Amino acid sequence: MKVLVTGGAGFIGSHVADRMVADGHDVAVVDDLSSGRREQVPGAANLYQMDVESRWLDRVIERERPEAVIHLAAQVSVSRSMREPMFDAQVNVLGSLGLVLACRQHGVRRLVFASTGGAIYGDTEVLPTPETFPAWPESPYGAAKLAVEHYLHLFHRLDGFSAACLRFANVYGPRQDPHGEAGVVAIFAGALLEGRAPTIHGDGRKTRDYVYVGDVVEAVAAAMRGEACGAFNIGTGIETDVNRLYGLIAGAAGSDLAAVHGPDRPGDVERSCLAIGRATEVLGWRPRVELAEGVALTVDYFRQRVAATA
C-alpha cells in the first residue's frame, strides 16, 4: 500500500521507513531534517522536506494519497517542553491536529500515532502501568500527546476514523542522537566511547522501561496492519533504574569511567514501567530483544560511527 511516514528521517522514523520499504510498500517521508538525517531516508522513498505545521502538508497528502499514515514527527524533549510549552504545543498538538484533519479529508484508511508511555501517566502507584490507569502527565510534552489521543478518540466516535495510539516507553537503539536531550542510552554510549564521563540527572534511582527500536518497529507494523483503535503501551514491562543501565552501557563500551551526578531535571517522573498485555492480546506483539542485548547492539553501532570518523 502507499504509506506516509512523518519524521521518517529521524531515529525511530527511519527504521520504520526502512521496514515499510522492505515490506513492499510505496513509501513517502515528511521530515524537516531539523534532527533527522537525509541519508537515513530509504532511497526508494519520496522525501518531502517540511515540518508538520506546514500549510503544504495537506497538498502532500492530497498528492500522495496514502492509505496509511505513521505519525512520528514530534518535539521529543521533555525538558524543552518545560522551558517552551507553547512551542511544544505548536508542534505536538497543532501540527498533529492539522495532519489528522488532512488525513480525514483525503480518505486515509489508517493512522498510527506515536504517543508516549513514559510521560503520559505521570508518577503512578501501579507498576507496570496499564492503559486503563488515569493519565496525569507531569510535563507539557505528555499533556500534548494525551491531547492528540483525545482528538483521535473523538474523530473515531464522530466518523469512525481509524487510529492506533502507541504509547512508547523509552525507546533506544542505533541511529538515536547521542548529542540531544533525549535518549539516555545513546548519550551515555556516545560519551563513554569518546572517553567522556556522562552526567546522570539525580541519584540514578529513577526507573524507566527501555524498549529496543527494532521491537518498536514491529509494533508499528502490527498496528498499521490491524484495525483496533485506542491506546496501546509499547514497552517491556520491566523496570530498570539509571544506575543499572549505566553499568550495562559502560560494560558494553569497555569503560570504567564513573558517571557524574547532576541535578534532577524538571518534568522527569520517578518511576515508569508499562503493562503490555493489551498490545500482546490485540496486536499480537511482544518485545523480543532483552536490555543487555539491545545495549550491546547500540554500543556497537556507535563504536562503528566513532571508528569511521577517527
Image (cartoon, rainbow, N blue to C red):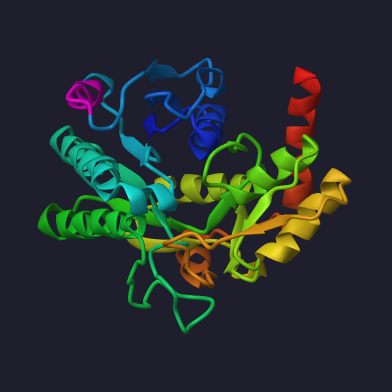
Q: Quadrant of the N terminus?
A: top left
Q: Which quarter of the picture shows residue 243?
A: bottom right
Residue 302, image x, y percentages = 73, 34
Residue at 16% from the left image edge and 54% from the top image edge: 155
Q: Which quarter of the picture shows residue 138?
A: bottom left
Residue 145, image x, y percentages = 32, 55
- Whether residue 130 is visible to the viewer of this picture, yes or no, is yes
Q: Residue furthest bottom?
A: 125
Q: Is residue 106 magenta?
A: no
Q: Residue furthest left?
A: 158
Q: Which quarter of the picture shows residue 7?
A: top left
Residue at 61% from the left image edge and 56% from the top image edge: 211
Q: Is residue 59 magenta?
A: yes
Question: Vertical placement of 79 versus 55: above or below?
Answer: below
Please state if 283 lies on the left or on the right of 102 as rendered. right
Residue 43, image x, y percentages = 53, 15
Residue 84, image x, y percentages = 30, 46
Magenta span: helix, strand or loop, mainly? helix
Q: Quadrant of the C terminus?
A: top right
Q: How many marks?
A: 0
Q: Nearer the viewer, residue 199 or 147?
A: 199
Question: Vertical placement of 34 versus 108: above or below?
Answer: above
Please state if 33 lies on the left or on the right of 22 as rendered. left
- Whether residue 292 is visible to the viewer of this picture, yes or no, is no
Which region of the structure is painted magenta? 54-62
